[in-house]
Image: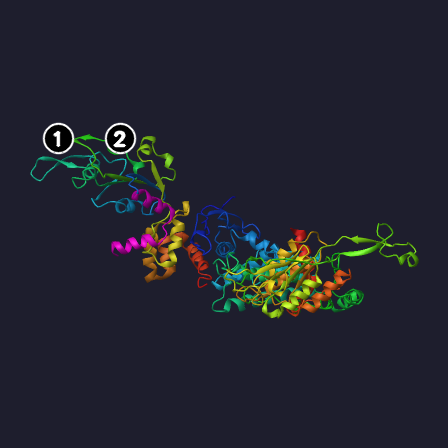
Amino acid sequence: MTTTTKNKLVNTEKLPDCWQTLEDCLNAGVTRVILFGPPGTGKTYAGIKHGDVSRGAHRLICTEDMTNLDVTGAFMPSHDGKFMWVAGSALKAWHGDGTQGARLVVDEIDKAGGDVFATLLAMLDSEESASWQNPDTGETHTPKEGFSAVMTTNIEDVNELPEALKDRFPIAIRINQPHPDALKRLSHDLRAVAIALADAGDQRISLRTFMEFDKLRATLGDEKASKYIFGRRAEGILDAMKINAVGSST
Amino acid sequence: MTKPKNRETKFPEPHFISRNDRPVGRWTVEECAPKRGVAHSNNVERRIVAPTGNSKLERLIRAHELMHTKISPADDYEKWIKRGIASHQSMVAVEELRVNYGLKLQGFDVAELLDGNEDADGEYVAIHNQWDSAVIFAVATAGTGGAKRFLVGVRRHNKLWADSLATIQKRFLKEIKKDTSRASNGVYSTRVENESGLAPRGFQWTERMAEYLDRLCKNEPKPIEAKTAKKDTEGEADEEGDVVSSVGPQSESSTPEEEVEDITRLSPLSSKGDNEDWGKLIWGKVPLTKTVQGNLGRKRISSNLGRNPRRIHRLYTDPQRRIFDRVKRAQGGIVLVDGSGSMQLTHANIIQILESAPGALVAIYSDMDRGRGKLPNIHIVAKDGKTVANEKGLPEVGAGNGVDYPALKWAVGQRKNHRTPLIWVTDGGVCTPTGGLNDRLTMSCIKESIDSKVLVVEDVEEAVNALKKLHMRQEVTRNWPVYFSQLIRKVGGVQKIQKIQTARSESN
């Protein structure tokens, strides 16, 4: 699909509220957004692809064990036996293409350890305050104009995030359903169901699971595919699918 | 709830259900015992309560509740009830049948759907002589395993009832089988109905059959001897006909045919044009420049008090010497005229009506642009003693009907009190702006006429006679137009409609 066609699609089809809010914010030039909500709805994908990402997007996946190496960078051994400085994702995003900043996508921000979290706070500060000094060269780095950041997390309540982080990201959007473009990869009969189950609490089934089910049922049929993918929920799901088919032609 | 260890719980999956009339959303699923009346679903709050065990019955109950989440009304349920076509409890019962039949269509074995107490329920209603409860239960369980057991229970105490209930169950199952077998049937459609704006469209089937069920509930089968005896004792009342008093509420007498009907004679209303609905009233104005004398229902009567002795002859003829006049206050009056083409009204006819109803509020309606909503479809042609100057002042009429029921409702609302006479001049060929004519819409007009004591007359001649009689404060007999009387006969007579309406208003 060409960009023009895609744009046309986006323009002509009504986006769900959450995705429309994101589009509106990014189009208006907002540079800091938190996307939260159930997993498997395309939050990271949106961070990497949506808005102005012409200078690239750099991704960070936070875990408790990660270090600042991934954020700012570190000395790494090179092939000639020496050590050289390798920049981290945040620094790369600050610099972008050398003249303008790029996008930094931080996944699972709530899972970052204390050190990393503190560094991230510094790197994500406002353009006027944010700076970082390279320990090797002593050079001071600041984010270039156009730098933007999207954070994603699976928490249900954005208030669970630390105050300092929320302050840096005034806009938080709960993404509660898959993006329509992603849904188009599913068979028609599963689309509405995938939307409903993306945000179904304990009963949640992700878009990825549906895509696998869709693929599998094409060769194995509904019953087997359901059994393999959904396990003990298969019987209930098959019954529900049968019931959902009633009156489908009208 | 104490659960056996290692018992595998199986929850219903309402998130897999999608509908055309409402967006998807998050459901709450709760657990309950596998008993009748305990499991339920709430489509508005998106909550489903169902058993979670492994038995066939529990699986069927889960499926039953899921089918409700798929096809039963959600936000519009109140509106369906307020339409007043069928009672709430009948709609609930027929919806059970629609749900169970839908399960059967999708391959579920609904013969397994029973809780084991149905025969006791059957015995209870038969012993306590609760015919309406018996019919409701029989229809709600029709086609399931519970239905047979229920009839066994009823048969132990009343064979006649059991046979009748079996006939009713067969009739309902036959109707749904017939209606779902059509290629483009909408029995399970979840779309929003274009005309009425109500959803889901498939619930129209439930509403139509519930109206039939309402009638069956008021039609307890009697042994032939009892029926004959009853007819003999009530024969005198039957002869009275359908009389409308000129000033008071019309008499509650019935048409003769309804006393001899039996269950097999009743039938559901036709489903033809089920998706049609009335148009909206668009008011047009015509200048009312001519003042007319008199007032409908107004009368001068003699009196022994007064200033001007206008009846001096009574000085010798009247023992009470009532030589003065007293003007009795008018009741007012409303005449609603169906100006559609089928009425074949001429301007002269309309003028004739206007002349016969001096001082009355006279309105005429006819949809002139097939519901496009650009031309007015109702005009007031006489009000407060003024009317149009001449024929040229009359609005253009003579096309479709389109707004019979809304116009009738409007006319009813114009009454100053319940004794204000209201005459509706119509041939009974009521239809929607697109020309759709169906039993449901016709019934709504009939019910409104009965409820609001509207005098329905078929043609101008009859209207003029009725108006003259009203003017003289004489009784007027209501003769239903042919279209209406056919349908009234089909549904069991005026008295049956009145009984159902009364029962419904009491339950509300």
Of all chains, the one bearing label 1 is: A
Query: Real-space Cα distance between discs 2 and 1?
Result: 21 Å
Q: Which residue is mark 2?
A: A118
Asked if one can make out residue B153 in the rendered structure from this viewpoint, the answer is no
Mark 2: amino acid? Ala
Quarter of the image for residue A121 reads: top left
Would you say the residues marked 2 and 1 are in contact, meaning their CB atoms lie under 8 Å apart?
A: no
The disc placed on residue A136 is: 1
What residue range appears in magenta? A1-27
Q: Nearer the viewer, residue B292 or A8?
A: B292
From the viewer's perspective, is A110 left or right of B246?
left
From the viewer's perspective, is B71 left or right of B150?
left
From the viewer's perspective, is B341 left or right of B292?
left
Q: Residue furthest left?
A: A80
SS at badge 1: loop
Percent position (x, y) of residue B404? 60, 62
Q: Nearer the viewer, residue B177 or A54?
A: A54
Q: Residue at x 23, y 39 (%)?
A: A146
Considering the whole magenta stretch, tell me its main secondary structure. Answer: helix
Percent position (x, y) of residue B160? 69, 65
Of all chains, the one bearing label 2 is: A
SS at badge 2: helix
Q: Residue at x 74, y 54 (%)?
A: B330
Disc 2: CA contacts within 10 A as few (<14), some (14-19) or many (>=20):
some
Percent position (x, y) of residue B380? 62, 58
